[in-house]
C-alpha cells in the first residue's frame, strides 16, 4: 500500500532522492520534505525506501506496544559489529536484552542516581574551573566541545570509575578517537554500495575495535582485582545476578554494554545541554527566571544536593523545551508485530517498519499550535502537560526499548545548567545563527558563548 504515501517528485533508480539532498544533513533534509509532504511520507535512498511518520495521530498509533515494537535497522543495525546484542542494538528476541535490562535497570533507580550525584558534581566542577579561566581571560567557550567533555567524563566516572582526562587534554583520548572512528565507519557502511570500497577503513576499524575491547578488558580486570567502584554501573554488571534466573552477563556482553553506555550516554546529553545553553543565551527572560529559581532553591549552598536538583522545575522545563525542538536522537524506528493497519489507513505487513521523526512530531501544529517553532518552556508546566494528548513528546523513545538513561541524563543536565546559571551570565554572539550538525545525533554547530562571572551566590 506504499502508493498511497506521498513522496518527493524525483524518482531516480539508485541514488534516489539523495541526489537532490545534502549528504551531510539527511535529517534536516527529511524535515524539509516532511513540511512539504505531510504527516507520513517516503523517500528513496540508496535503492531502499524509507517511510517517515510524524503526524501526532499516526505517531501515537505507532507507540501502541501491543502492535508495534522497536525496529533494529539502518544506523542501529550497523553498530552491531561493535556492540552486538548490548541493550541499544539487541534484536527484540535476543535473550541478552531482557537479561541486561533486568540486571541494569536498578543502576538507574533513584537510589543509584543519588550515588552518582556527587560524582556528577565532581565532573561539573571541572567544567566550571575550565570556564572560570575562560571568563577571567575574556575568552569565548566552545559549548558543544566542552559539553561533550563533561558528559563523557560523567558517564565514564559514574559508569566505570574511569577518567579520560578530557578537560586536561587538547586532543581527544585515544579511546574516544577509536570509539568515534568505529561509529563513523559503521555509518559510512550505510552509504556505499559495497563494503569492499572501504577496505582500507575496514582495517583501521578492526584495530579500533581491538583497542576498545582491550581497554574495557583492562578496566574489568582491575575491578575484579579488588578496586571497588562504589556501586557504579560496572560493579552492577559484574556482580548482579538476574533476580529470578541467577544468570549473569558474560565477559563479552559486559564489553559491549560498557561501550554502549559510553556512546549512548554522552553525545545525546551533550547536545541537549548545548541546545539548552543556546536557547538560554537567546532568551534572557527565560534565563533570568531559571536563574532566580536556582538562587531560590539552592540558596548559597556550596554544593547542591540530589533533592535540590530535582526541585529545579523550571530549569527542567528549559531542558524539555530544548529537547522538543531538537531531540538529540532525532528518530527511532518501529515495526509491526503482526499484519496491521496504521491509524486505520495504512496497511502494514508483519515486520514492516517506519521511522518516527521526532523533531517534526514535536512541532506538529495540531498539538503544539501555530507557534510550534517558538521556544517556550511554559509548554511543559504541569497544567499544559496534563492537557496534551499522550505520545506527543518522545525524545527518549517509547515502550520497553525506551531510553534506560533518561533520568540519568535529565539529572545531569539539570544539575549542570543549574551550576552554570548560578555562576555565569551567558552572552551570545549576536551574529550567530543556529546551524545544526548531524552525526548519529544533532548538535548546534560552532556555538560559542562569552561568560560574565556573577558575583552573587557561590
Ligand atoms: C535508548 C535518547 C541519554 C542509554 C534511547 C532511545 C532514545 C534515546 C530515543 C531509543 C532508541 C530506539 O528506539 O531505537 C536519549 C537522549 C538522551 C539519552 C535524547 C539525552 C538527552 C542516555 C544516557 C544513557 C542512555 C545518559 C546511559 C547512561 C540508552 C540505552 C538505550 C537508549 C542503553 C537502549 C535501551 C534499550 O533498548 O533497552 N535513548 N538518550 N541514553 N539509551 Fe538513551
Image (tube, rainbow, N blue to C red):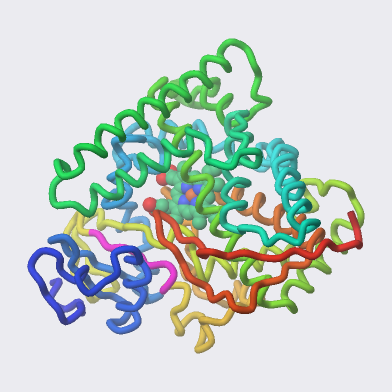
Is 340 displayed left or right of 286 in the figure?
left
Q: Is residue 179 above or below residue 323?
A: above
The answer to which image quadrant residue 329 occupies is: bottom left
**Residue visible at 51% across and 82% down?**
372
**Residue 320 x/y as whole percent:** 60, 65
Is 273 displayed left or right of 43 in the figure?
right
Magenta stretch: dominant secondary structure: strand
Q: Is residue 94 above or below residue 368?
A: above
The answer to which image quadrant residue 4 occupies is: bottom left
Q: Quarter of the image for the C terminus: give it.
A: bottom right
Q: Residue furthest left?
A: 13
**Residue 349 x/y as whole percent:** 16, 60
- Which stretch is magenta? 353-360
**Residue visible at 65% across and 27% down?**
231
Is 169 displayed left or right of 237 in the figure?
right
**Residue 167 x/y as whole percent:** 65, 42
Q: Is residue 245 above or below residue 440?
A: above
Residue 382 seen anywhere in this rendered image of the structure: no
Q: Is residue 358 magenta?
A: yes
**Residue visible at 81% across and 60% down?**
422
Numbered-mark total: 0
**Residue 23 x/y as whole percent:** 29, 64
Amino acid at each position: 500500500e506504499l502508493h498511497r504515501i506521498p513522496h518527493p517528485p524525483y524518482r531516480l533508480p539508485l541514488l534516489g532522492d539523495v541526489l537532490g539532498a545534502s549528504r551531510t544533513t539527511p535529517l534536516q533534509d527529511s524535515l524539509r520534505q516532511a513540511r512539504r509532504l505531510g504527516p507520513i511520507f517516503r523517500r528513496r535512498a540508496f535503492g531502499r525506501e524509507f517511510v517517515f511518520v510524524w503526524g501526532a495521530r499516526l505517531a501515537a498509533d505507532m507507540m501502541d506496544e501491543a502492535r508495534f515494537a522497536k525496529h533494529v535497522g539502518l544506523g542501529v543495525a550497523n553498530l552491531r559489529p561493535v556492540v552486538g546484542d548490548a541493550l541499544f542494538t539487541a534484536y527484540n528476541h535476543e535473550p541478552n536484552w531482557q537479561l541486561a535490562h533486568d540486571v541494569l535497570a536498578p543502576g538507574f533507580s533513584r537510589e543509584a542516581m543519588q550515588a552518582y550525584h556527587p560524582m556528577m558534581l565532581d565532573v561539573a566542577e571541572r567544567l566550571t574551573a575550565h570556564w572560570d579561566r575562560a571568563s577571567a581571560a575574556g575568552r569565548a567557550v566552545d559549548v558543544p566541545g566542552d559539553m561533550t567533555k563533561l558528559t563523557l567524563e560523567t558517564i565514564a566516572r559514574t559508569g566505570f570509575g574511569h577518567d579520560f582526562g578530557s578537560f586536561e587534554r587538547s586532543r581527544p583520548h585515544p579511546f574516544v578517537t577509536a570509539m568515534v572512528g568505529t561509529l563513523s565507519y559503521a555509518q559510512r557502511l550505510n552509504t556505499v554500495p559495497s563494503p569492499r570500497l572501504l577496505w582500507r577503513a575496514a582495517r583501521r576499524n578492526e584495530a579500533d575495535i581491538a583497542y576498545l575491547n582491550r581497554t574495557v578488558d583492562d578496566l574489568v580486570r582491575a575491578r575484579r582485582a579488588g578496586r571497588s567502584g562504589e556501586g557504579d554501573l560496572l560493579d552492577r554488571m559484574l556482580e548482579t545476578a538476574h533476580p529470578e534466573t541467577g544468570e549473569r552477563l558474560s565477559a563479552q556482553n559486559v564489553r559491549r554494554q560498557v561501550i554502549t553506555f559510553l556512546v549512548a550516554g554522552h553525545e545525546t546529553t551533550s547536545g541537549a545541554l548545548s541546545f539548552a545553553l543556546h536557547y538560554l543565551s537567546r532568551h534572557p527572560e527565560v534565563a533570568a527566571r531559571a536563574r532566580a529559581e536556582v538562587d531560590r532553591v539552592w540558596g548559597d549552598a556550596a554544593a547542591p544536593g540530589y533533592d535540590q536538583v530535582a526541585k529545579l522545575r523550571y530549569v527542567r522545563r528549559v531542558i524539555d523545551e530544548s529537547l522538543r525542538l531538537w531531540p538529540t536522537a532525532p528518530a527511532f524506528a518501529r515495526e509491526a508485530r503482526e499484519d496491521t493497519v496504521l491509524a486505520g489507513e495504512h496497511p502494514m505487513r508483519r515486520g514492516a517498519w517506519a521511522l518516527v521523526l521526532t523533531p517534526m512530531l514535536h512541532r506538529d501544529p495540531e498539538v503544539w499550535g501555530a507557534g510550534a517553532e517558538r521556544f517556550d518552556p511554559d509548554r511543559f508546566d504541569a497544567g499544559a502537560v496534563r492537557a496534551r494528548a499522550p505520545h506527543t513528546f518522545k525524545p527518549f523513545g517509547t515502550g520497553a526499548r525506551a531510553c534506560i538513561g533518561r533520568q540519568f541524563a535529565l539529572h545531569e543536565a539539570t544539575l549542570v545548567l543549574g551550576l552554570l546559571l548560578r555562576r555565569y551570565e551567558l552572552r551570545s554572539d549576536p551574529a550567530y545563527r543556529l546551524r545544526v550538525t548531524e552525526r548519529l545525533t544533532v548538535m548546534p554547530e560552532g556555538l560559542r558563548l562569552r561568560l560574565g562571572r556573577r558575583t552573587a551566590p557561590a
